[in-house]
Amino acid sequence: MPENDGEESGEDEITRNMTADENMSDDDDNDDGSSSGSEESSSSGDEIENEKRRLQCVQEMSELEKQFVDIKEQLYKERISQIEKKLITVQEGNH
């Protein structure tokens, strides 16, 4: 695997976060494996909040991906323009 100089790839970060989430959910269980009624209702509330947060994150990620595609397209067009200018210069023999 290539070295990233201390940077974490997105895939590694997601795996690390998923593992941390699993560990947190293991801590929520009682020692005897049962849960009380108030914990069930708060657990249900937590699930709703988690789902809202997940949807918000998905929406933000979608927006970031759109921005990335737009910027990538802009950079591509700028690079093509630069190459065309160099090509014209070479064809004219001024290079």
Image: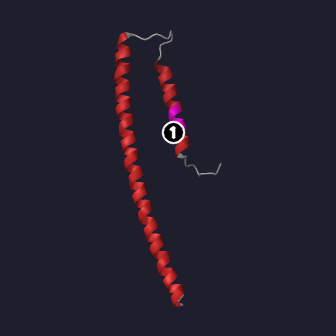
Element class at badge 1? helix
In this rendering, position of residue 57 left or right of residue 88: left
**Residue at the image position 50 percent from the left and 9 percent from the top:** 32
Q: Residue furthest right?
A: 1
**Image spot of residue 8 (x, y percent):** 55, 46
Res 75 → quadrant: bottom left
In this rendering, position of residue 36 left or right of residue 9: left
In the depicted view, which residue is nearer to us: 22 or 31?
A: 22
Res 77 → quadrant: bottom left
Q: Is residue 10 above or below residue 85?
A: above
Q: Is residue 8 above or below residue 43?
A: below
Res 67 → quadrant: bottom left
In the depicted view, which residue is nearer to us: 12 or 30?
A: 12
Numbered range of the magenta stretch: 14-18
Looking at the figure, which quarter contains the C terminus? bottom right
**Image spot of residue 19 (x, y percent):** 53, 31
In the depicted view, which residue is nearer to us: 42 or 51?
A: 51
| Residue identified by numbered label 1 | 14
Q: Is residue 51 above or below residue 94?
A: above
Q: How is the image coloured?
A: secondary structure
**Residue at the image position 43 percent from the left and 11 percent from the top:** 35
Q: Residue furthest bottom?
A: 93
**Residue at the image position 48 percent from the left and 26 percent from the top:** 24
User: Is residue 47 a member of the stretch shown in magenta?
Assistant: no
Magenta segment's dominant SS is: helix
Mark 1 surroundings: few (<14), some (14-19) or many (≥20) residues within 10 A: few
**Image spot of residue 52 (x, y percent):** 34, 32
**Image spot of residue 13 (x, y percent):** 52, 41
Q: Is residue 18 above or below residue 66?
A: above
**Residue at the image position 44 percent from the left and 60 percent from the top:** 72
